[in-house]
Amino acid sequence: MAAHLSYGRVNLNILREAARKELREFLDKCAGSKAIVWDEYLTGPFGLIAQYSLLKEHEVEKMFTLKGGRLPPADVKNIIFFVRPRLELMDIIAENVFSEDKMHSRDFHILFVPRRSMLCEQRLKEQGVLGSFTNIDEYILDLIPYDGDLLSMESESAFRECYLENDQTSLYHTAKGLMTLQALYGTIPQIYGKGECARHVANMMLRMKREFAGSQNQILPVFDTLLLLDRNVDLLTPLATQLTYEGLIDEIYGITNASETFFDNLTVEQEFMTGVDTDKVNTYIEDCIAQKDPLIKILRLVCMQSVCNNGLKQKVLDYYKREILQTYGYEHMLTLNNLEKTGLLKPQTSSRNNYPTIRKTLKLWMEDANEQNPNDISYVYSGYAPLSIRLTQVLARPGWRSIEEVLKMLPGPHFEERQQLPAGLHKKRQQGENRTTLVFFLGGVTYAEIAALRFLSQMEDSGMEYIIATTKLINGTSWIKSLMDRPESQTP
Amino acid sequence: MMKSKADEEDYWNSSKFKAFTFDDEDDEFTRLKESKQAVNSIRSLVEEEDDEDDVEKVSWSGEPIGSKAKAGGFQSFSESLSDSSVRHYAPELRKPKSEYKDYISDWSPEETVQRMQQGKVFSLEKFRSLQDKLLLLDQAVRVHDGNVITAVLIYLKKSLSKEVLFRELESRQTALRHFIHYLTETKEQRLLMELFRALGRTEDMALLQYKEHLSITDENKRRDFLKSCISLPFSPEDAVHVQDHFTLLERQIIIEATDGQAESGGKVEIFQKFPRRASILNMPLITTLYYCCFYHYSETEGTYSSPANIRQTFRIAEKQFFVTALAARAKLKAWLDVDSLFSSRNWLGFSRRKSPLSFHRVVDVLQKNNAPVQVLQQYVGLVDDAELKISLAQKHKCHDIVINTYRDLKDRQLLLGYRGKVGRGSAEERKIDELLSNSQIRWKN
């Protein structure tokens, strides 16, 4: 039992236990002593599900990191590869299999996390090793509980796939993850959403429910509401430097800049967020380019300016692009194209800039933010309230009908769906009992947004408690990086 | 060995069991079905006419068998098989007839897709006509399962001509996206480009082609490749960038060759004093400019390595050029050159007061290159904003400026306070003392 997962209203231990059970079952399938070869990326998520003690109980005697060449010696009956379904990892596995000593060969198995892949199995076949595996299975670890109120799929490419490549496969898995969640925690009676992806996920959920009609879920619902939000409804928040403790640690770790430049950066960000001079070339950005600051820092700033201005004037955009390509290399043209496709860095179209209206109506900029004794979510960005969280807040009270006009200015449809509950399962709310909303960020969520939601949960008269789920925990840097098109190089 | 549902598929798909794989084009599965039907029909005949020699008996492989065989259960046939590859059918065939539907009968697209999702045995080969294949694809898309869609696409890729496949994908956005993703993952560049061309996605095609340059290591080959990219259907802005990229590399190759020779020749002073630490090849434009401002500053516009030439050819912004030249000359401690950058005599037309770069940034760059205080002082003095000027002067110990500013402000206290910051017995200390004892100054405090 993980104590940190059950302190909230929703006991995420149930989810964790279900995941552990599946893991145990797979391990037992590969009977006998075993060694696990780990895809390093997975050790984090798995650590949240099971410790070594569980593995030991199921005869795991050794653990190795996946790498090329020959596997280390280990006197075990089975070798199990725990890997993500990535082609390059298949090549490494093939190498491992080929270099196996035929005299003391062990049984091979693969556990794909979070799911199998036809492409990967095809690759293994092409390499001539597919037949060497006794068990090939998938461990559907869709929603990983990171904390008592936080779930993540850790799907690093979800934003890129959905918004750049128009590939909604990850949304299918999101829907499935939500179905699993409902199987454990009960059908969620109300679904709200904003955005194209949100709509798509809701549609799939409703269809999946229909397909399983007949087997009614008798569990008393834990969640009252599900709110699905597209990341591109609020592109600004992940670009801004986070000021909460966790956010700061997440962002700054590894950076050696003086605090002076840090505050300079913050000042410029705040200028953009309040609409100051967003239509001109910004001197600070120019200077940063001139001193060849890390490219991602530049990209975050120009994207921020673009988002706050609803696109940059063609002249300004051309100027920035040229400066960037001349300073960092022409090959970054590919990245700039990607950013444009996702709407982060784009030319101004003829439509007016709605951002000031949105900012005013939703009170995104709170002058008197008090970080020591906050009374509003804007403390997480020193006066700027994340748009995504404001939307969440308004949904609870007074409801989205009061901001219809603003919602129309934001991309994608907004909607409401109801799911039928079996008779007798409708919750009778006690006096003063909180409602529980699951907020699902499609495309990533930042620590600052998490902090803001936790703040709302703790507010005395909110009447609402929030559980947060997402495709990936992001910060501005990791997010922009996922959109860059030169993965093999060390981008400065 | 424990069996799992994965085992079943592996059993049928693995290379060890060559006789029957699902992607197998010879489709032995169909041949098996046919021969089984043949055997079935024979059986009834043989049962009635036991010794009939005219009845042709066939083995599982479809070949007639030599000797007369008594009709019996299927077991006897399978036992007589010598062909080891075919023998593997036997375990399944021992099952009662009613279960044959699971393995042999026709599955609809819906059933096939469902079996694929459930990891059960399936066969795509029986979807022969274009219409059947498209029904299968549409069903796969309907269930949203990425693996299933990919498996079907792999089959279609193998069994349809490019033209037909591309045409059909054009009207199926989801399947198209999956296909693009598949080709990207498996790095089938050529086919992907043909696809983009067929779809009229010319810019995507151009960018994809351009991206290839990253995998060409030889600079000459890369230069030639970039040249070939220029005529691709980029957007107008991107086309200019690609042109610039080619031109830049072309020049870098020339400069690299010339400078490499000059350096190893041992006669050119600057290369001896400041040996080159890295090749200029494939460096960004501004880095190249910096290099040329460092090693080729005085050259006229006529050479490829002259900074002026580079500035003009690549239309470098005034500010960028200025800060780069400043940094390079400061690094070399060429303070006269730095000064000239601001002089109105300079062909660039900068006057002392109109630097394209704010003076406090100028000071920053100079300080990073360890400019002596006298030099720094010159430029700190040019900073307009009084507060900024004072803080910079203090930071960089430009004592004269601080002293003069406090004098101008007539602030005795500040001046007194600053006395402690200058060296004991220094000229600055004497200057402060002189000022403090100057009765003509009407100090405000």
Image (cartoon, coloured by chain):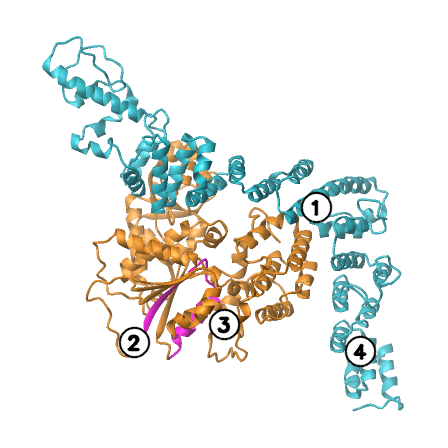
Chain colours: A orange, B cyan
Q: Image height check: is B413 above or below A200? A: below
Coordinates of residue B340 in the picture (x, y in percent): 86, 60
Instruction: Say if mark 4 contacts mark 1, CB within 8 Å.
Output: no
Task: Name the kind of residue labelled 1 in the image.
Answer: Asp
Position of A257 with respect to B291 (left or right) is: left
Position of A476 with respect to A183 (left or right) is: right
The secondary structure type at the circle numbered 3 is loop
Give the residue pinned by disc 3: A385
The answer to whether residue A146 of the structure is visible from this angle is yes
Give the residue pinned by disc 2: A433
Coordinates of residue A263 in the picture (x, y in percent): 62, 70
Q: Chain of mark 1?
A: B
Q: Chain of mark 4?
A: B
Labels 4 and 1 within one chain: yes
Residue B402: numbered disc: 4
Quadrant showing the N terminus of chain B: top left
Furthest residue to the front? A350
Task: Name the kind of residue labelled 2 in the image.
Answer: Glu
Labels 4 and 3 within one chain: no
Q: Which residues are magenta?
A: A433-460
Residue A257: numbered disc: none
Furthest residue to the left? B48
Tell me how far mark 4 sits from mark 3, CA to CA.
Answer: 43 Å
Instruction: In this rendered view, identify the residue nearer to me: A138 or B271.
Output: A138
Position of A180 with respect to A73 (left or right) is: left
Give the residue pinned by disc 1: B244
Tell me how far mark 1 sits from mark 3, CA to CA.
Answer: 43 Å
Instruction: Say if mark 1 contacts mark 3, CB within 8 Å.
Output: no
